Image (cartoon, rainbow, N blue to C red):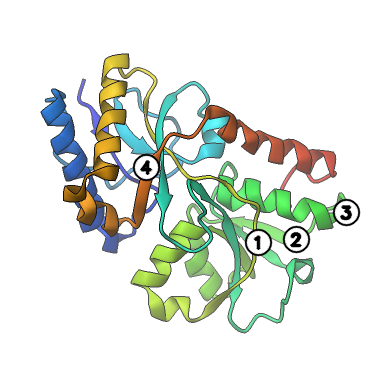
Amino acid sequence: MSLAVSLPMYNFPEMRAVNMRFWEALRGLLIEAGIGEAPEALTFERSPVPDRLESEMLFSQTCGYPLETVFRGQAIRLAAPVYDVPACKGPTHCAFFVVRADSPAQGLADLKGSMFLLNSPVSNSGMNLPRRALADIAGGKPFFRGVIETGGHPASLDRLLRGEGDVASIDCVTYAFWSHYRPEAAARVRILAETPASPSIPFVTSVMTPPETVELLRAALHRLAHEPHYAAARAGLRIADIVEVPDAEYRGLLDYEREAAELGYPRLA
């Protein structure tokens, strides 16, 4: 069986070189540790939310909410990155409610009756976190005029700029990279509000990965995070550290789901 590796969460075309540099550094550490079958190249075509997590997946990054729901039991969390971007405190992230720069909205309540652009119905930053934020003000009723599924955060931002929707909930790390690589587009939008925080998107391996390989992956990530030789590989992805996060922190994403339901807003609508 051929093993697969991917970094699909922060994968703008402009970022291929920095993603490859990170993987090449990690791959070198894995080969040094005895994992000779580590693939040379990343798979860039993999969707951030695939139909399933591949049994042959040696290394990837997968959103925390689907790991607790549709992908439960398919992957092992290895560690969580700490990103040096605004709104990330330690191994956490949040989402931004993003509107066009000329939007009249001044707060979340002003979005009532607008059109929401949704990257994926099982996304943490695109659905679960904004659902929890909106549950406090939705009054147990649909909040938006409609919800358009776009297939990804970049697509949501593109459609927002084209006027096909009024607001999107964008992972703050995605927003940081998008603003860096596409500043002219970023100048045409603004952040209206933030969602609650959650653990950052973890690095994972397939549940079929042998336990000894799992430990070698964790050790390699620890070295990559802390040895000065790999500073450039980390910096390209704005990674300040890579740390262990207890499973309970990710299960807390289901608390947001439960709390929204208790407030009468079980579905982002």
Residue indicated by mark 4: 242
* Marks 3 and 2, how far apart at CA: 12 Å
Going from the N terminus, do you reach mark 1 or mark 4 first? Answer: 1
Secondary element type, mark 1: strand
Q: Which numbered disc flags the more N-terminal residue, 2 or 1?
A: 1
Task: Name the disc covering residue 116, or none.
Answer: 1
Residue matched to label 2: 144
Q: Amino acid at mark 3?
A: Gly
Marks 4 and 3: in contact by CB < 8 Å? no
Q: Nearer the viewer, mark 3 or mark 2?
A: 3
Q: Position of residue 135 (x, y in %)?
A: 78, 51
Sooner in the amino-acid sequence: mark 3 or mark 4: 3
Q: Are marks 2 and 1 in contact (CB under 8 Å)?
A: yes
Q: Which amino acid lies under the numbered mark 2 shown in the image of this protein?
A: Phe
Q: Residue 131, can we see it? A: yes
Snapshot quadrant of residue 75? top left
Where disc 3 sits, the SS reads loop
The one of 89 and 96 positioned closer to us in this rendering? 89
Residue at 55 percent across and 70 percent down: it is: 160
Q: Give the residue type at disc 4.
A: Ile
